[in-house]
Structure formats: structure tokens, C-alpha cells
Image (cartoon, helix red, strand yellow):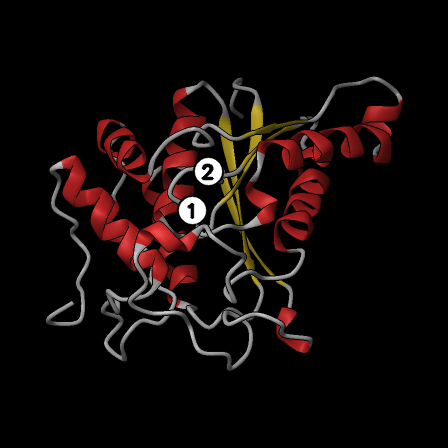
Amino acid sequence: MTSRPAAVVLLSGGLDSAVALALCRSEGFAAYALTIDYGQRHRQELAAARRVAQVLEAERHIVLSLDLTQWGGSALTDDHPVPAGRDPSVMGADIPITYVPGRNTVFLSLAMAWAETLGTGDVFIGAHTLDYSGYPDCRPEYFRAFEQMADLATKSGVEGLFRFVIHTPLIGMTKTQIVRTGSRLGVPFELTSSCYQPAPGLAACGVCDSCILRQRAFKEAGIEDPIPYVPGN
């Protein structure tokens, strides 16, 4: 039984959440990784999350099924086309079709519930506001509001046992800084998956918003991106 304080980490299997997991452990927490299988089209990230959790030595890793395809509303949960070939300068101009309604609120609620059973209010998420695609549930004011809600909605919060803290260690980083931080912490980039529409052989498409931002970040960081891409992309 570890003597380190526990923290729940939302782990998608992508670059950002893997770095968040590594940062959680570097800050002295025992990391409990939570991955949500919500019916996402890019299901390769579930296997990536399992690999990352193992290599980065999460205390426990849960993959929880929750089918958000029942109502869709996103290119990640139904048959809307995924945006491709967009310039990064326009990605944050509006909320894209890859936005999944309520996703972070649902995910954080589940992480909050698990954290409370572990006797902790610490939850990590790899959200950031620079070099992102305009998602409203990635903003600092959203996370502060969630903390207030969690303190009001839980037995632990009402009884004053502990306060909930949503740790967002990447919130002010550029994607390039995230890559450099992950490299310093030994994050296994080759095991992560960021693509929204991978090819049949699971090579990343190289043209979706997530791939474009990832490729630019590795290039600017001067680090080779070890995952395979579709030839020419």
C-alpha cells in the first residue's frame, strides 16, 4: 500500500493526458488513471491509454464504458466528417464539430466520484487553453466552477473532510511546451495516440486538427514524433 497521497488522472491515451499523468506522479501523487470508453470513433486511444498507464506505473487503471453515441452531436461520436487540413490559426476561432457535448463535465464527475472513494479531492486533467481547438470546457474558469460544485455536491465537501482540486498542470502551456515537458519526464510518446481518424493500420491521418497540432509541436520542440503517419502526411 503506497504512502503517497492519491489522485485520479483522466487518461485518454493522447499526448496531453499522458504528460498530465507523468506530472501527477512527479508531484508525489499515487496516480489512479481513469479512461472513459464513450463510443469514440478513434478507439485506438483506449489501447494507448492502457499502455501508457502501465509504463507510467499508475496504481490502478479503470476503463469505464459510457456510450455517448446514443445521442451523438459530435464528429467523434457520430458520422459527421472530422475537419481536416485546417490551419492552426483558425482552429480556436469557433467551437468545432469535434466538441463532445458535456464531455469534460461528465468525465470530471466520474473522476470526482472515484476520488472521493479514495479519500482524496485531487483530480488531474490534461486540458490546456493555448494551441487548442476552442473547447469551452477547457477554460480555467470552468475548472474553478467545477471545484466549487464538487465541494457542494459531495459528502466530503459538505463535511469539510477535504476540498476538491482540479489540477490542470498544462493549462498555460503551448503544445510545444507540453512535448518538451513530456520528454523531460520520460513520457512514452510512441505509445500515445492523438489522431481523430486513424487509417486502417492505425497510422495517424496527419490532417485532422489533433494531428496537425501534434506534428507542429514536435517540430518546434526539435523532437521526432515516434508515431506512424499516413505516408505523405
- x%, y% of residue 192? 31, 52
Residue displayed at 53% across by 17% down: 3
- x%, y% of residue 124? 54, 34
Is 217 on the left or on the right of 223, as rendered? Answer: right
Looking at the rendering, which quadrant does residue 177 occupy?
top left
Label 1: how many Cα within 10 Å (few below 14, some 14–19, many 20+): some
Q: Secondary structure at mark 2?
A: loop
Number of marks drawn: 2
Asked if one can make out residue 50 in the rendered structure from this viewpoint, the answer is no
Q: Which mark is residue 225?
A: none
Looking at the rendering, which quadrant does residue 81 occupy?
bottom left
Residue bearing mark 2: 128
Residue displayed at 60% across by 47% down: 136
| Residue closer to the observer: 91 or 40 | 91
Amino acid type, mark 2: His
Instruction: Answer above or below: position of 41 versus 36.
Output: below
Evaluate if marks 2 and 1 touch, with contact meaning CB atoms under 8 Å apart: yes
Amino acid type, mark 1: Tyr
- x%, y% of residue 180? 23, 31
Residue bearing mark 1: 132
Q: Looking at the rendering, in which quadrant would you find the C terminus?
A: bottom left
Q: CA distance from mark 2 to mark 1?
A: 7 Å
Instruction: Answer above or below: position of 73 versus 23.
Output: below
Q: Looking at the rendering, in which quadrant would you find the N terminus?
A: top right
